[in-house]
Image (spheres, coloured by chain):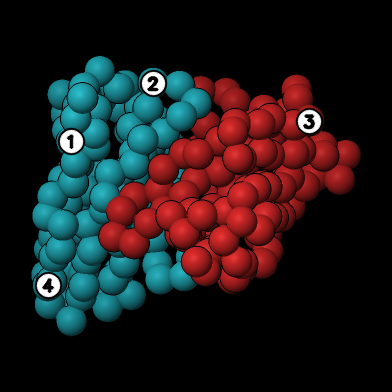
Amino acid sequence: GENVEQHPSTLSVQEGDSAVIKCTYSDSASNYFPWYKQELGKGPQLIIDIRSNVGEKKDQRIAVTLNKTAKHFSLHITETQPEDSAVYFCAASKSGGSYIPTFGRGTSLIVHP
Amino acid sequence: GAGVSQTPSNKVTEKGKYVELRCDPISGHTALYWYRQSLGQGPEFLIYFQGTGAADDSGLPNDRFFAVRPEGSVSTLKIQRTERGDSAVYLCASSLGYEQFFGPGTRLTVL
């Protein structure tokens, strides 16, 4: 089955700095890679996703890159704000009807004002 | 519109008891997923419904776990003979396509 590794487990930055979270996956058939933000006491919320036919996607301060050859993908947050503090999860899944994701273990991002 | 809701938000039970956890998906979403999230971990897939039928239940850990979705909307996750190791947050998500919308979860504590 799919295995997703996520690093770092904790990331502490100053407000305004950039933050980068990296993930690797094992199943070359995976073709959909969502990123979720989870705040305390809430369910994960999709913040950005990328499909295997593109290498990069950007949405305001958030960008995701995908390297299919190396089987790794990364989340980049620029100009971090205290409200970006949360746990971030990467995931990998395959098309075919279900899109059942395998999640990484999460990165706790702390943005200091 | 309303998001995914889950009830109860917290459930404390004793070892060996039976529990039911409820999920109300977003209206019109045909796909429904159950996950289990332990502390410091990502969500772990349990079961996936497409309409009323369980299309993939490969994530259910054993036969003490069962889920139903009789009318294709609300779903109930049932756990028999609960064990302390079942303690976790149980998340439900619904979708129409790629994007899954998660509920806030039910925190289950087995004493």
Task: Looking at this view, name the residue that lies furthest to the bottom.
Answer: B111
Dot 2 and dot 3 within a common chain: no
- Asked if marks 4 and 1 touch (Cβ < 8 Å), the reply is no
- Asked if marks 2 and 3 touch (Cβ < 8 Å), the reply is no
Amino acid type, label 4: Thr
Quick one: B92 or A35, which is closer to the camera?
A: A35
Amino acid type, label 3: Gly
Residue at mark 2: B96
Dot 2 surroundings within 10 Å: few (below 14), some, or many (20 or more)? some
Residue at mark 4: B13
- Asked if marks 3 and 4 touch (Cβ < 8 Å), the reply is no
Give the secondary structure at mark 3.
loop
Chain in cyan in the render? B
Give the foreground label among 3 and 1: 3
Amino acid type, label 1: Asp
Query: Quadrant of the rendered structure where residue A69 is?
Result: top right
